[in-house]
Image (spheres, rainbow, N blue to C red):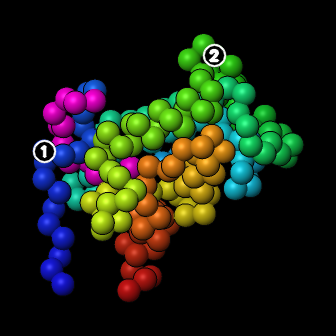
Amino acid sequence: SEAPKPRPASRGCGVAALGDPPAMPCNHIMLDLETLSLRKDAAIIQIAALAFDPETGELGKSFNAFVRDPSGHIDVQTVAWWMQQKAAATIGADVAGEEAISENDACRAFREWMLAHTDACPDLPNGGAEYAIWSHGATFDIVVLENACARIGISKPWSYRVERDTRTDQIRQQGEVA
């Protein structure tokens, strides 16, 4: 089969607002969550993401939302770990701050941001091969956010076919995987 053609520059993530023309073809999303548990139903206190072009390394728009009063599992040991971190005071202030939003609003805002910046749709015929969502470890951030979306009754804005793990790519680049 023929290799997929590069995504045209007219579609992508470098948009200032919905409907504005894109600045670059950033069709991949790096996801990072901060949570209060290590379980798959963990309470999320921050959703952060960055759009990027894996071919050029160019960075696109970012997403950041602090979550107040999160639902999901809260683990005492994880909270104790957070209390020992230097960033705990800053993150705690952000979660308690005026800009923090509900888990429902944060998940819906991320979904809207991702769909706008990847032009993605979970039911694309090719399973969304034009984009990917990455996290450091395939079994945590992506899974926790998927569960949070399910908790509030919305579909995740990506197909399971486009989930990627940075650790696998790092191993591949080191030549340990053929």
Q: Residue at x 61, y 48 (%)?
A: 150
**Quadrant holding the C terminus:** bottom left
Q: Is residue 22 magenta?
A: yes
Dot 1 surroundings within 10 Å: few (below 14), some, or many (20 or more)?
few
Report x, y in % for residue 35.
68, 43
Pointer 2 residue: 97
Say which label, 2 or 1, has the lower sequence index.
1
| Residue type indicated by callout 2 | Gly
Q: Which residues are magenta?
A: 18-30
**For residue 23, side relative to residue 147 (left or right):** left
**In x, y percent, where is residue 151?**
66, 45
Q: Residues within 10 Å of mark 2 (few under 14, many from 20)?
A: few
Q: Tell me: residue 79, above or below residue 27.
A: above
Against 74, residue 104 (above or below) is above
Q: Position of residue 12 (x, y in %)?
A: 23, 45
Does residue 56 show up magenta in the picture? no
User: Could you tell me if residue 146 is visible in this image?
Assistant: yes
Q: Quadrant of residue 91?
A: top right
Query: With 168 as the anchor, is 43 left or right in this view?
Result: right
Q: 166 above or below 2? A: above
Q: Where, by quadrant of the figure, is residue 87 drawn?
A: top right
